[in-house]
Amino acid sequence: MSLIHIAWRNFCHRALSSFLTTFSLALGVGLVVLVLSIYGVISEAFTRNASVGYNLVVGPKGSPLQLTLNSVFYLSQPIENLPYTEYMEFLPQDERAAMVSQFGGDPELAKRDGRYAPYIAGGFAIPLALGDYFGEFRVVGTTPDFFTELKHGPDVNEDFTFREGRAFQDFSPEHSYFEAVVGARVAKEMKVNLGDKFYPTHGDPSGHGHELGFTVVGILDPTGTPNDRAAFVNLEGFYLMDGHAKPVEATEQSETDDENILDEAIDAEESNETQPTTDTALNNNTPATKGASQGPTEAGTNDAASDSTANSTDARSADEYRLLSIPEREVTSILIRNGNIMFAPGMQNAINEGIRSQAAAPIGEINKLMTFIVGPLMTALLVITVITCIVAAVGILVSIYNSMNDRRRDIAIMRALGARRSTVTSIIVFESFQVALIGTIAGWLLAHAAIVMYSSQIEDQTGVQVSFFTTSNSEILVLPLVLVLALIAALLPAWAAYRTDVGSNLSA
Amino acid sequence: MTKLLDINQLKKSFRQPEGGRLVVLDIPEFQIDKGEQVALIGQSGGGKTTLLHLIAGLLSPDQGSIRIAGHEITGLSEQGRDRFRAETIGYVFQTFNLLPAFTAIENVRLGMAFGSGKHQNARAADLLDRVGLKDRFNYRPSQLSVGQQQRVAIARSLAGRPQLLLADEPTANVDPSSADSVLLLIRDTCREEDVSLLTVTHDMQIASSFDRIEKLDEINQVDHTPASSA
C-alpha cells in the first residue's frame, strides 16, 4: 500500500471537509486561470488584429495609440483629418497626375512624386475615411485596394474572402460609387443581405442619417479581425455624402496668420526633405509641394450629393455627380506597407519630424498599450486572484491541522506498525498535494468550461477563437505555484505529525 | 532453545511534571525463547505497556540491553528501530486500533506497508480468511463487531511475518464469550507462523493457558505498591 493511497484514504475519509477545501482552492485556481486566459485573449486579439498586412498607420498629429485604435481597431474617435494631398505624398507622379486630372486640383501636384513615394516602392498606401456609422458599426470609406492588398490570419497571408458577393469596385458603368461590403459580424447583427441598402449616420450611431445609401455587394467571411465589425464603402461615395466635403472657401476666408505660418513651416520642411538612399529614391527628384494643397474650388461643390435622393443614387451616371476636388477631400488615416520594410523606420521618422502628420506602428502601439496599461491592470487582477489561492491554501492548512487531533491516534498506530516519522510526515504532505492537484485540475476545468461557454461571445467581440484547450503560456505555472502553496500549507500539520508521541496516543 | 528476546539490566524512567524522574522499570533480565508463548501479568500502572513499547522500540530505555533475534535494538537509531519493528515485531493493541478510513483488508495490508517486504494482497486475504473474516474484506471497522475488529487487528499484526508478537491485553475489550476464541486464535496463529508471543494480561485464567507465566512484580525491581498499602 503506497503512501499516496494512504493519503487518498484519509482524503476520502474526511469527504466533506476535503471537498470544501478542494472546492475553495478550485475556485481560486479557476479565477487565476480565467484572468490568465482573458489576458491571453486580449493580448492575442490586439496583437493579431494589429497585424493585418500593413506596418504603419499615418494620421494627424496627436496620440499614436488613439490613431491605432481608431484606424486599426475602429475604436475611439478619430483625432482629426488629413488633407488628401497628404495621402498623395505616398503616391508616384503618374497616380498623382491622374488624380489631379480626374478630381481637379493644383497642377503642381501632378508634376512630382509624393515625398514618401520612394519609401513605399512595391508597397501600398490605402486611405481611410471614418466618421460615419451603420448602426453601432463604423463605416469605413476606402478604396478597392483594401480588399486586394491587405491580408489577415495568424501568418498574415490570407486574402479576404467573401461569404457572398464581391468587393466593391472603382466606378464604371457597371459599378456605382455607392457599393458597400460589410464584415461578417455587421451582416449578422444588422441582418444584412446582398442587395440591401443602408444609410450611414453621421458622427455617431445616433447621428443624423445621410440621404445617400450604399448597396451591399459583398459580405466578408469572418476574419477574426476588427474588419468583421466594419462596413466598407467606396471612398468616392463616402465623399459624395452631404457634409463630407471640406468647405474650402470658408476655410480660406477664416484661415489665420497662424495657419499661414504652419503652411510656411510645412513648405520649409518639404524643401529640406531627405530621400532614402536607394536607386529608386535617388532617381526620384521630389519637388517641394509649394502651395500644392489648394486647387481650384467652386462654391457648392457638394450640391450634387446633397440634392440626390437615396432611391436614385445607383441609377445615376458619373456625370450626374460632381466629384470632390482634391482640396475638398480629407482622409482620416492612411494604411502603409513599405515594399522594403527597411524603409519603414526612415519613413516613420520623416513623417513624425513633420508638423502635420504622424506615423504609428500598430504592433508597437499595442505592445505599449499591453505593457503600460492593460498589463499592470491584469497584473493587479492576477495578484488579487493569487491572494485568493493563498487564502484557499490557508484553508488547506486549517482543514488538515484541525483534523490532527483525530489523526494523532492514526499516526501513532502507523508508527507502531513501523512507519517512520518521515513517512507519516510524507502522508500529510501527500494529502495536501492531493487537495492541490485536484483543486488545480478542477479549477482549470471550471475556468475553461466557462471560457467555452462564452467562446462564441468572445469570438464575436474579439475575433479570437477559443476552445477548451486554448491555454496561455502562464497557465503551466499555476500547478507548481499551487503545489508550493500546498507544501507550505502542509508544513505545520506535517510538523505536528512528525512530533506525535506514539505511546501516549496509542493508549488514548 | 534459542533466545528470541533477551533483556538485560533494562531501566526506564519518565520525567515528572513536578520535577525529578519516576523510575518505572528496572529489569535485570528477561528472556523469551523462539516460538515460546509467555503471559506477563501485573497490576495496572506497573509498567507492562511501557515494557512492550521498549521491546517494540517505540521507547528508548535509560540503560540496559534488548536483543531481539540477535539484534541489539537499543543501539539502533529511531529510524532503525522503526524499520526493525516493521519487519520483526507484530503488535496487537488492547483497543484494536484499526484505522477507520481503511477497509478490513486495507488495515491488514497496512501491517506490511512500512517494512521492506512486498505488499502481498494474497497474504492479507489469507490472514483474514484464517481469522474467519473471508466475507468481510471490504468492511470498514465501523461496520464490524468488536470481536471482528480484534480479529482484523490480529491478522494485521501478523501480516508482516514478525518473529515476535506483542499483545497488550488483547481480550480486555472483547466480551467474555469471545475472549477465549480471540486468545485461541492468537496463539494458534502464532504457532502456525512460528511466532513467539508475549501477551500482557491481568487475567490469571487467561495466563494459565500459556507456556509460561511471568509476573512483572517479580522481574521488575521497582516497587509499584501504593504507599498507603505498604
Image: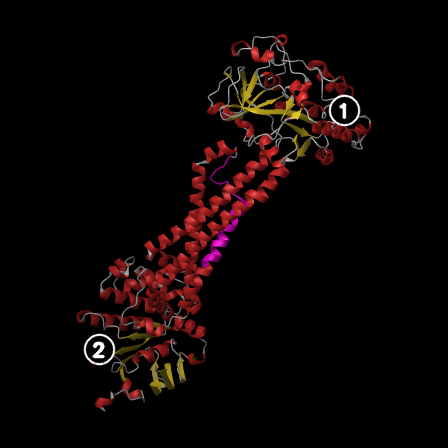
* Residue pointed to by mark 2: B206
Residue ID at (45%, 72%): B79
Residue A488 placement (x, y as % from top left): 46, 61
User: Which quadrant of the rendered structure holds the N terminus of chain A?
Assistant: bottom left
Q: Does the magenta segment cover residue A440?
A: no
From the viewer's side, name the closer residue of A414 and A181: A181
- Is residue A486 visible in the rendered image? The answer is yes
Residue A475 placement (x, y as % from top left): 51, 47
Which class describes the residues within 10 Å of circle 1: few (<14), some (14-19), or many (20+)?
A: many
User: Which quadrant of the rendered structure holds the C terminus of chain A?
Assistant: bottom left
The kind of residue tagged 1 is: Thr
Does B23 sit left or right of A263 as displayed?
left
Residue ID at (32%, 54%): A16
* Residue pointed to by mark 1: A289
SS category of the residue bearing label 2: helix
The kind of residue tagged 2 is: Ile
- In magenta, the rendered stretch is A465-486
Does A266 sit left or right of A385 as displayed?
right
- Is residue A50 visible in the rendered image? The answer is no
Q: Dividing the picture into quarters, in which one does residue A317 lie?
A: top right
Q: Are marks 1 and 2 on the same chain?
A: no
Q: Does the magenta segment cover residue A482?
A: yes
Which class describes the residues within 10 Å of circle 2: few (<14), some (14-19), or many (20+)?
A: some
From the viewer's side, name the closer residue of A209 and A187: A209
A334 to B29, vertically: above or below:
above
From the viewer's side, name the closer residue of A418 and A209: A209
Labelled disc at residue B148: none
Residue A216 placement (x, y as % from top left): 53, 17
